[in-house]
Amino acid sequence: MLASKVITMQDNSAHGEDSFLTKDLGSDEFLDVVLDGVTGHGGEQASTELRDALDSGILNNSKDIVSLLTEMNADFFSVGSGRFLLTTVSAVLGRGETIQIVSAGDSPVFLINKDGHKKLSGNAGGFLHVGVARAIGASETLGAPAVVEITPAAGDKIFLATDGITDNMTIEELAEVIRNASTPEDASAKIEATIKERLQDGRVPETIGVRFRYDDRTGIIRFF
């Protein structure tokens, strides 16, 4: 695996229901995860329990992740009947020469480089009910999570986010900030500054809805 640098960013002051995990697996291999617990539906407990399960699991490939998500979905549904214990999850696993992305719900993952940006999974800015319908715990049988595999190149940048970020900055804005940043820290600082400024103003660009949406926000930025 190519060497990489990573930074995490989180403000959980709105609801306290986002979770994240970034794990060094050795030999430059890694696991990055963001989870957005569904507000009013046991989201904090769901996102925390799923994060801990991913942290303790032995995950060698996307099949292992899907298997764990399927098991946790059954556990959550047996308790919450699709109304309680709901969370999105997007996981990025770097093993060998490839990166495998597994996503359930609407927390997006982006690949950003000098050529542009590409959404690898998730539904940024999507309607809540679409994300909830695909969330872990929402259905007795987990719908097939989105699975994507890529081979990273030097200069590639991976960005995972919850909707507290993507509802308040456009994808184009986020991609430009990350593309032009020299380090993950620079990118994170610029994103935080922009969102805080918009929170104070109470407004965002018209293309994403005009009014600021106050929500937990979590991001992971990894530079190769």
Image (cartoon, rainbow, N blue to C red):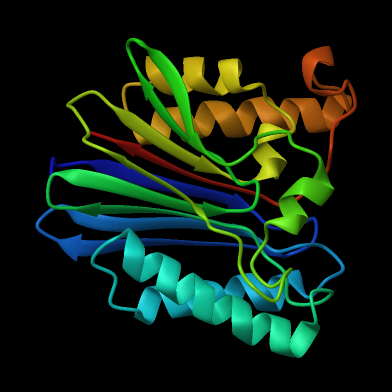
Q: Is residue 78 above or below residue 12?
A: below
Q: Dividing the picture into quarters, in which one does residue 206 lie?
A: top right
Residue at 74% x, 70% y: name it.
43
Image location of residue 103, percent across then percent down: 51, 52
Residue at 52% x, 56% y: name it.
145
**Would residue 125 be seen by someone viewing this image from the given angle?**
yes
Residue at 81% x, 40% y: name it.
127
Image location of residue 69, percent across then percent down: 50, 71
Left or right of 223 in this view: 204: right
Q: Is residue 86 above or below residue 219?
A: below
Q: Residue furthest top?
A: 115
For the residue pair 23 and 69, the one nearer the viewer reads as: 69
For the residue pair 212 and 107, the one nearer the viewer reads as: 107
Q: Residue furthest bottom?
A: 79
How many marks are shown on the rendered structure?
A: 0
Q: Dividing the picture into quarters, in which one does residue 171 lie?
A: top right
- Give the quadrant of the C terminus: top left
Q: Is residue 10 above or below residue 167?
A: below
Image location of residue 23, percent across then percent down: 32, 63
Left or right of 150 in this view: 26: left
Image location of residue 47, percent across then percent down: 62, 70
**Would residue 49 be seen by someone viewing this image from the given angle?**
no
Residue at 71% x, 89% y: name it.
78
